[in-house]
Amino acid sequence: MSYEAPAPRPVTVVTPLQARRALAPLFLRDTVEAWIDQQPRGVRDARRYAGDVYRDDPTLVAAAEALSITDEELDDLFALGATL
């Protein structure tokens, strides 16, 4: 009988700092921040004052769609952010 480790669970939450650090080397940080700056005040406030960044947040999903970031790329960004 052999043991097979379960597949790793996708990362669903990172801190704002981890998110920024994951975006920077991919040259996406300025693009994402420019998109956020164009959004209503409530969205900008959520970005500035949120305690964590959630993978399923509707604003995050909308930003990814608007910036042509695929679900797979978003998952990869969260996985990278969790290591930083």
Image (cartoon, rainbow, N blue to C red):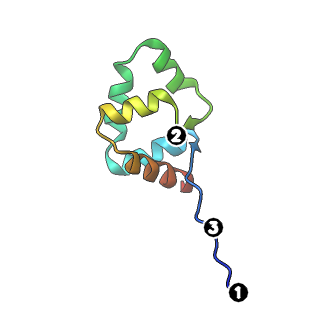
- Which residue occupies 38% across, 50% down? 73
Question: Could you tell which of marks 3 and 2 lies nearer the N-terminus?
Answer: 3
Label 3, secondary structure: give it: loop
Q: Which residue position holds label 2? A: 55
Q: Which residue position holds label 1? A: 1
**In the drawing, does residue 59 fall left or right of residue 1?**
left
- Which residue occupies 45% across, 32% down? 60
CA separation, marks 3 and 1?
15 Å
Please state the horizontal and vertical placement of residue 62, each as a whole percent of the image.
Answer: 39, 29
Report the number of discs.
Answer: 3
Please state the horizontal and vertical placement of residue 18, each as a whole percent of the image.
Answer: 53, 45
Res. 6 mark:
3
| Label 2 environment density (alpha carbons within 10 Å; few <14, some 14–19, many ≥20) | some
**Is residue 60 or residue 3 the one in the foreground?**
3
Label 2, secondary structure: give it: loop
**Is residue 34 or residue 64 the one in the foreground?**
64
Question: Could you tell which of marks 3 and 1 lies nearer the N-terminus?
Answer: 1
Question: Which amino acid type is marked by label 3?
Answer: Pro
Please state the horizontal and vertical placement of residue 22, each as a whole percent of the image.
Answer: 45, 48
Mark in the foreground, 1 or 2: 1
| Above-or-below relation of 72 to 41 | below
- Which residue occupies 37% across, 21% down? 37
